[in-house]
Amino acid sequence: MRRALVIAIAACLSASLPGCASYKPAPISPAENARSLENRSLDNPRLRHFIAVELGGESKADPAPSWNLSTLTLAAIYYHPDIEIAHAKLAVAQAGIVTARQHPNPPFSLANVFGTAAVATAAPPAGVAAITIGPVIDFLIETFGKREKRTAQAQHLADAARWDLATAGWQVRGRVRTALLDLWAAQQRLVLSRRQLAMQDELLGLLEERFAVGEASSVDVMLARVGKTQITLAIRGLEQSEAVARAQLATALGIPVRALGGTGLSLAAFNHPPPLPASVDTGQLRQEALTKRTDVQASLQQYEAAQSALQLQTANQFPNVIVSPGYNYDFGINKYMLGLGVDSLPIFHQNQGPIAQALGRRQQAAASLDALQAHIIGQIDQAAAAYRAATRSVATGDALLADDQRRGAMIERQFQAGQVDRVALVTTRLDVAATELARLDAVARQRQAIGDLEDALQQPLFDPGHWPSVAGQTAELEHTKGSP
C-alpha cells in the first residue's frame, strides 16, 4: 500500500514536467556585435528584399533601389536599433497577455505524515500501513472577473506598445528626412558658393590688373580679397556641414557613415515644396493629428490600461474562493475531504490603498493625454507659423532675385554693346549670386518648416508615395533578418 501511494504521488508531480520551459542561454559578445554593426551596408540582399516586398514587388533577384526618402526610411526601419527596441517591448507586452490569462497553479501539500502503529490507540490490523498521510490540493477560483480585467489591462498595454512601435517608425523617418534635408541644403549652398567664389576670384583678378595700371585703389583690391577669403571660409564651413549631414544620415539609418560612400542619393523631394492645403493647420489634418497620431493612440491605450487596473483593484477588495479537495489515508481507513475557504478576509482593510493608487494612475494617464494633445497643438501652430513666414521670405527672395536678374540682363546687354566694362558685369553677377544664396536660406527654412509640419501632423508631406505600416512589419522583419 505504501509503495502504491508513493508511486501515485510521484506520477502526479511528474505529470506537469513535460510542459515546463527550459532555460536557453543567449550569450552576447560586444566585439562580435560591434563587428556586425560596422559591417552593415545598403547593399545587403536581405535589406533589398525587404524594401522590394514593402514596395510591392518581390522577385528572385531584387533590383537595387533608388535611395530616396521612402527607401531610406525603409532601410532605417530595417536597421535602426530604436525599431528593434520597440519590437522587443511589444513582444514583452504581448507575453504579458499570456501571463494575465493564466489561471493560478494550485499548491499541493502532504499533511499529517507521521508515525508508526505505536502512535495509534490500537495496533492496526495485519497488512495495514502504520501511517497517516493526507495529500491536499488548493484550487483558487478568482471572483468578480479579476482574470478578465487583468487580461484587458495587459491587452491595452500591448496595444500601447504596438502604437509605440509605429511612433518609433515616424521618429526614424523624421530623423532621416532632417538629415537628408540638411544634406540637400548644404549641397545647394556649396554649388552657389563655389560659383560665387569663381566670380569673386575673377573680380579680384580684374581689380588687381586695374591697380597695376593705376585705375583702381588698393582699398578696392583689399575689399575684393577679403570677400574672396570670406567666401572661401564659408565654403569650408559648408563642406563640414555636408560631412556632418552625411554622418547624421548614417546615424539615422543605423549604419556606419562609410557605408554611404559611393551611394547615389536622390534628394529631388526637396527641390520643390509639396502642395499643402491652405488650412493645413486648422482643417482635417489638424483634427486627425489630435485624435489619430500614433502617440495619441498609445496614450489612449495607456489610459484604458489604467481603467482596467482600477477595475481590477476594485474587484480585489472581494476575496477569492479556495476549493481544497483532499484524501487522507489513516491507518487503513480512506477518508475523502472537500475544504472551502477564501484567500483573505476583508477585516483590516478593503483594498483602499491599491484602489487609491490605481485611481491616481488613471488621473495621471488622463493628464498625460491632455499634455500630449496640448503639445501637438503647439507643434502644429509653431510649424505652420514658421512655414508661412518662410514662404513669405521665399516670395520676397523670388522678387528680389527677379529684379537682380533683370538688372543683370541689362548690364549684360550693355557689356555686349561696350557701354560698361567687365568689372561692372562681374559685380552684377556677384549681386545676383548673393541674392540666390539669401533666397536659398529662406527655401531651406521653408522645407524645414514643412518637415516640422510633417512631424506634427504625422502625414508624409515629402515623398508621400509610400509610407509603411511599421506596426505590421514584425513578421517580415523577422523573416528577412533571420532567413539564411
Image (cartoon, grey):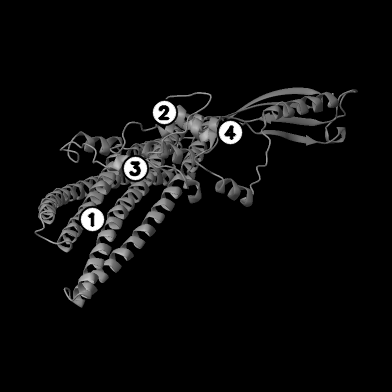
Report whether 286 appears left or right of 187: left
Task: Give the percent coordinates (x, y) of residue 338.
Answer: 63, 25
Give the residue pinned by disc 2. 55
First in sequence: mark 4 vs mark 2 = 2
Q: Earlier in the sequence, mark 2 or mark 3?
A: 2
Q: Secondary structure at mark 2?
A: loop
Circle number at residue 437: 1
* Drawn side of residue 117 relative to residue 372, left or right: right
Mark 3, residue position: 267
Q: Which quarter of the picture shows residue 135? A: top right
Above or below, 142 against 179 in this view is above
Q: Nearer the viewer, residue 26 or 369?
A: 26
Q: Which residue is mark 4?
A: 482
Q: Residues within 10 Å of mark 3 (few under 14, many from 20)?
A: some
Question: Would you say residue 337 is visible in this rendering?
Answer: yes
Q: CA distance from mark 4 to mark 1?
A: 49 Å
Is residue 315 at least partly visible in the picture? no
Task: Tell me the amino acid under the disc marked 3.
Answer: Leu
Q: Do the residues bearing badges 4 and 1 touch, measured as CB atoms within 8 Å?
A: no
* Three-letter residue code for mark 4: Gly
- Tell which circle, 3 or 1, labels the residue nearer the N-terminal end: 3
Front residue of 380 and 15? 380
Gap in angstroms between the C-alphas marked 3 and 1: 19 Å
Number of the front mark, 3 or 4: 3
x, y percent for residue 272? 24, 41
Residue 184 place in picture, x, y as percent? 33, 48
Task: Inspect the image, locate mark 2, and give the three-letter code of the amino acid beneath it.
Answer: Leu
Q: Residues within 10 Å of mark 2 (few under 14, many from 20)?
A: some
Q: Is label 4 in a helix, a strand or a loop? A: helix
* Crowding at mark 1 (Cα within 10 Å: few <14, some 14-19, many 20+): many
**Element at label 3:** loop
Q: Residues within 10 Å of mark 4 (few under 14, many from 20)?
A: few
